[in-house]
Image (cartoon, rainbow, N blue to C red):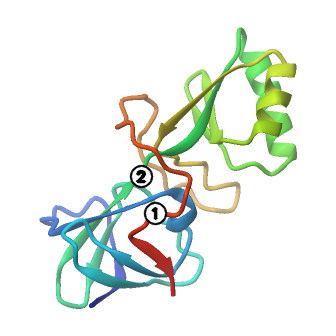
C-alpha cells in the first residue's frame, strides 16, 4: 500500500501515473483507504478540510502522480423557463444549505425526492441522471473550480459508496 499525502498544482505539466475515481462525498474526506484504477491500494492522507475536484493531481510517497476523477453519481439537473425562476430555485436550495453545481442556465444537486418535489412545485423542470457532481466551494471555500458546464459526462450508476474506497 502506498501513501498519498501531497496535492500538486493542477496546472502542472506532470505525467499522470494512475487515477482515483471518487464521488463528491468521498472527495471531501482527507483520510481514506482507496483502490486506484490500476488496482493498487493506497491511503489518502491529506490536510484536513481538503476537498478534491475532478482533475486535481496528487503525489504518492513513491513519486506516482494520481489524477482525481469525479465519479458519476445520482444527481438532479434543474432548469427553468426564466433565469429569474432559476434564481428563485437556487435561493430556496441555498436557504436549505444544499450543495449546488451552477451551470449556464441550470443547477445540479444530489438526488433528493423531497427537494425534487419542492422544485417541481416551484415550476422547475428536473431530470434525474448519473453524472459527476462538482458543487460550488461556497463563499469562504476559495475559488478553486474546474470546467463542467457541459453535460458530456459518462453515464455510470452511483450515489452509493464506491466499492473501492473506505474511510480510514
Q: In the figure, is residue 132 to the left or right of 94?
A: left
Q: Position of residue 92 (x, y in %)?
A: 86, 36
- Number of numbered callouts drawn: 2
Q: Is residue 45 above or below residue 149?
A: below
Report the residue at 55% width, 75% height from top: 29
Residues marked 2 and 1 touching at CB (< 8 Å): yes
Q: Secondary structure at mark 1?
A: loop
Q: CA distance from mark 2 to mark 1?
A: 9 Å
Mark 2, residue position: 71
For label 2, the crowd category at 10 Å Cα-Cα, with few meaning under 14, some 14 to 19 and many 20 or more, is: many
Q: Position of residue 33 (x, y in %)?
A: 42, 82
The residue labelled by disc 1 is: 162
In the rendered image, residue 18, in percent from the top left (x then y), is placed at 19, 68
The residue tagged with tag 2: helix, strand or loop? loop
- Farthest residue toward the top? 81
Q: Is residue 96 above or below residue 3?
A: above
Q: Which quadrant holds residue 116?
A: top right
Q: Earlier in the sequence, mark 2 or mark 1?
A: 2
Write the residue at 80% across / 27% down: 119
Q: Which part of the image, by quadrant, shows the N terminus? A: bottom left
Q: At 40% across and 42% down in the image, what residue appears?
A: 156
Q: Nearer the viewer, mark 2 or mark 1?
A: 1
**Is 152 or 53 nearer to us in this picture?**
152
Residue at image x 43%, y 28%?
151
Residue 126: x %, y % from top left: 67, 23
Amino acid at each position: 500500500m502506498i501513501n498519498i499525502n501531497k496535492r500538486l498544482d493542477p496546472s502542472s505539466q506532470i505525467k499522470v501515473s494512475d487515477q482515483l475515481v471518487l464521488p463528491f462525498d468521498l472527495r471531501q474526506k482527507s483520510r481514506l483507504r482507496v483502490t486506484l484504477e490500476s488496482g493498487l491500494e493506497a491511503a489518502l492522507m491529506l490536510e484536513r478540510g481538503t476537498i478534491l475536484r475532478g482533475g486535481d493531481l496528487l503525489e504518492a510517497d513513491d513519486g506516482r502522480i494520481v489524477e482525481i476523477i469525479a465519479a458519476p453519481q445520482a444527481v438532479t439537473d434543474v432548469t427553468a423557463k426564466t433565469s429569474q425562476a432559476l434564481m428563485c430555485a437556487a435561493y430556496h436550495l441555498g436557504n436549505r444549505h444544499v450543495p449546488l453545481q451552477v451551470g449556464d442556465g441550470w443547477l445540479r444537486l444530489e438526488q433528493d425526492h423531497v427537494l425534487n418535489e419542492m422544485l417541481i412545485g416551484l415550476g422547475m423542470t428536473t431530470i434525474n441522471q448519473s453524472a459527476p457532481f462538482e458543487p460550488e466551494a461556497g463563499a469562504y471555500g476559495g475559488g478553486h473550480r474546474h470546467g463542467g458546464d457541459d453535460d458530456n459526462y459518462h453515464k455510470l450508476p452511483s450515489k452509493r459508496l464506491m466499492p473501492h474506497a473506505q474511510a480510514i
